[in-house]
């Protein structure tokens, strides 16, 4: 409402036409020009003969006083004055009227009482709808409605029964973060993607949102996101508490956010912009239950990951340590194990490898052999050993772990093959060329025994195995493994998260075989698939363009590479801000591209900015910072030296680029022969 409309409403409801514009304007501003709040306040002041100044003083005492004032009942003054029932009704009547008209809208309103009140994604609500409808009770209710039966109970009891019998937490609790699905989407999660695209579901959601907007509970903001008045949140929370429904909807809010984080869509779109919702949901007063603890874990895990991507490694470490402490008390072993893994990974990023190795070694010592965390923990520790050149420790760890694995199922075969590839890397670096080749050959034979798998989890695992092959210089083997899951004509590939990643790995393998034109075509096909399953501006798009830019750079298509990397930088900045390893890595690439374009001053400027940011974010001894230093030392802004610079060898390019290693699947294109010393 406009200011003048708000003032007019206050005068009409309070029956005080002489009320000063200043006083009425102060009240309407304080109530954010929300019609329902203004109607409530005006009627309450009329009923109690309270002045506006007195009302405002009480209102400004805090949220508790505010929600108490705004939850007072009042009588409608003039139902025929052209003011809608929503405006003239009390908060309670409005909520219950909404429930009778559209129970989904009432559920959404109750859910959002525990989210941040601004920039609410519609996809949060789609997940909520999916979770609610996934319960057997919800399906039974749908069948009853389709048979023509009508509810006879009052709206409040319906909401209460929904909370008791159709708790969304139940749907989510079946998923474990270390499931044998290898953290990839289960069948239910694929239903999520279909649910997002279902037109009927979209119509139902928009109808519910339309009802909420009609009651002035929600309003549309930019980018199709939604805002909810803070006063509406306060009143809704108070109403839920009086009805005994608050804790149930806190649980639903936790579950909705956690499931969103783990969905295909969430993985592609999560960014620091979602933090206000994370924090709001986590700060709500949730019951101590297994379901709520699991949901909290997933939300915090994503917070730590995003903090890490933004370069806020200390904050990421704080979140991970809180996760370790919480899960230690909750008694959920597998979540506790994963929290330690996450903390160790962040410690490694902070160049605190020794602490990370000690934590993982201690974890392996207590892990039961049957634990689903055993393989991933061993692999993480082996990776740290290899990174810190502790090859003997890596070999001993991997030999022991491999000996404990059986070969009686596909999972064990795959895990043994994966660890044997890591073992071959350790042995190769111990100058045992023959033994390294033999170990890698054993890994390849195990891969040949793996059954074909069309499940996302199996495809993802084999894709990771293909990446390991690439790291060992076995590019043809990696390509063969990727092609098992793709049609001969890549134009017919079915777009999904997993196939997009496999296409990226295939492009990587081709690029390392100097088949750059083919690799670029495959990477463009991956981008085409991304457009089919994602909205613009997501991390998957950024990673794919980054990989394309690297291929273009190596192929010598410098203008194309510059355009791709500039686009990537904008995407990452929108997702993670102007710091963090993603944006710094892109700055490094752009600097190298401009250097090869003989744009000396631009290259120098970009590298200097990247160096200063890296020092601030990661510190002076981090590999990213050192990479900028190496590149700057090889640059010159003196155009008179252009002949020298332009004739730089491929080895010099490799030296300046080695630190800006892209995320998997793209490793260095120049490191092609890891076994050449054998």
Image: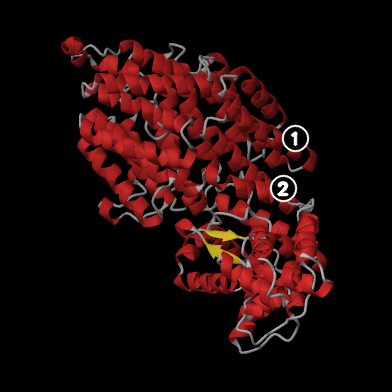
Crowding near pointer 2: few (<14 within 10 Å), some, many (20+)?
few
Which of the 4 quarters of the picture holds residue 636? top left
Quarter of the image for the N terminus: give it.
Answer: bottom right
Q: Residue at x 23, y 36 (%)?
A: 560
Question: Which x, y percent locates residue 481?
Answer: 36, 41
Cα gap from disc 1 to disc 2, whole angstroms: 17 Å
Q: Which residue is mark 1?
A: 325
Which of the 4 quarters of the picture holds residue 400? top right
Q: Residue at x 56, y 29 (%)?
A: 380
Which of the 4 quarters of the picture holds residue 363? top right
Tag in front: 1 or 2: 2
How many numbered marks have been drawn onto this rendered protein structure? 2
Task: Give the answer, above or below, for where 316 lies relative to 114.
Answer: above
Quarter of the image for the C terminus: give it.
Answer: top left
Q: Residue furthest bottom?
A: 148
Q: Which residue is mark 2?
A: 283
């Amino acid at each position: 409402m406009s200011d003048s409309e708000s003032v007019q409403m206050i005068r009409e409801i309070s029956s005080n036409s002489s009320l000063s514009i200043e006083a009425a304007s102060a009240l309407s501003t304080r109530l954010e020009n929300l019609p329902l709040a203004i109607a409530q306040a005006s009627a309450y002041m009329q009923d109690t003969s309270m002045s506006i100044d007195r009302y405002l003083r009480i209102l400004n005492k805090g949220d508790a006083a505010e929600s108490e004032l705004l939850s007072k009942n009042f009588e409608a003054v003039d139902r025929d004055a052209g003011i809608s029932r929503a405006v003239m009704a009390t908060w309670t009547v409005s909520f219950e009227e909404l429930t009778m008209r559209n129970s989904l809208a009432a559920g959404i309103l109750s859910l959002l009482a525990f989210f941040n009140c601004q920039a609410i994604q519609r996809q949060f609500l789609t997940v909520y709808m999916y979770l609610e409808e996934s319960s057997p009770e919800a399906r039974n209710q749908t069948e009853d409605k389709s048979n023509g039966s009508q509810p006879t109970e009052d709206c409040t009891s319906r909401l209460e029964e929904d909370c008791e019998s159709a708790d969304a937490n139940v749907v989510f609790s079946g998923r474990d973060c270390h499931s044998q699905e290898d953290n990839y989407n289960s069948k239910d999660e694929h239903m999520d993607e279909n649910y997002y695209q279902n037109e009927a579901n979209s119509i139902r959601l928009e109808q519910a949102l339309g009802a909420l907007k009609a009651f002035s509970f929600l309003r549309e903001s930019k980018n199709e996101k939604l805002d909810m008045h803070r006063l509406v949140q306060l009143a809704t929370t108070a109403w839920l508490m009086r009805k005994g429904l608050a804790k149930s909807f806190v649980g639903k809010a936790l579950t909705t956010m956690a499931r969103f984080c783990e969905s295909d869509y969430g993985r592609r779109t999560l960014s620091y912009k979602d933090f206000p919702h994370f924090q709001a949901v986590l700060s709500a007063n949730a019951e101590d239950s297994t379901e709520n603890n699991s949901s909290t874990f997933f939300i915090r895990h994503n917070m730590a990951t995003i903090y890490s991507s933004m370069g806020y490694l200390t904050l990421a470490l704080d979140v991970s340590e809180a996760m370790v402490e919480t899960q230690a008390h909750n008694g959920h072993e597998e979540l506790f194990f994963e929290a330690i893994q996450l903390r160790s990974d962040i410690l490694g990023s902070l160049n605190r490898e020794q602490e990370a190795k000690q934590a993982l070694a201690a974890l392996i010592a207590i892990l039961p052999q049957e634990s689903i965390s055993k393989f991933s923990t061993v692999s993480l520790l082996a990776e740290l050993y290899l990174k810190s050149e502790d090859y003997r420790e890596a070999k001993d760890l991997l030999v022991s772990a491999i000996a404990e694995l059986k070969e009686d199922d596909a999972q064990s075969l795959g895990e043994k093959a994966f660890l044997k590839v890591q073992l071959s890397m350790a042995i190769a670096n111990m100058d045992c060329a023959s033994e390294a080749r033999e170990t890698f050959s054993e890994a390849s034979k195990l891969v040949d025994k793996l059954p074909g798998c069309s499940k996302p989890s199996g495809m993802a695992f084999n894709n990771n195995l293909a990446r390991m092959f690439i790291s060992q210089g076995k590019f043809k083997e990696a390509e063969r493994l990727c092609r098992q899951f793709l049609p001969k004509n890549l134009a017919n590939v079915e777009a999904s998260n997993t196939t997009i990643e496999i296409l990226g790995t295939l492009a990587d393998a081709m690029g390392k075989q100097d088949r750059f034109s083919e690799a670029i075509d495959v990477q463009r096909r991956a981008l085409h698939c991304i457009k089919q399953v994602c909205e613009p501006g997501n991390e998957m798009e950024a990673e794919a363009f980054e990989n394309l830019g690297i291929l273009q750079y190596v192929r010598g298509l410098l203008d194309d590479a510059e355009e791709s990397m500039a686009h990537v930088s904008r995407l990452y900045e929108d997702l993670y801000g102007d710091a963090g390893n993603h944006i710094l890595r892109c700055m490094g690439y752009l600097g190298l591209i401009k250097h090869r374009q003989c744009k000396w001053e631009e290259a120098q400027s970009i590298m200097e900015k990247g160096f200063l940011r890296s020092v601030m974010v990661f510190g002076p001894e981090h590999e990213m910072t050192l990479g900028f230093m190496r590149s700057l030392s090889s640059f010159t802004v003196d155009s008179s030296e252009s002949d020298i610079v332009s004739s730089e060898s491929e080895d010099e390019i490799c030296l300046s680029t080695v630190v800006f290693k892209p995320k998997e699947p793209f490793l260095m294109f120049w490191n092609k022969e890891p076994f050449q010393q054998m």
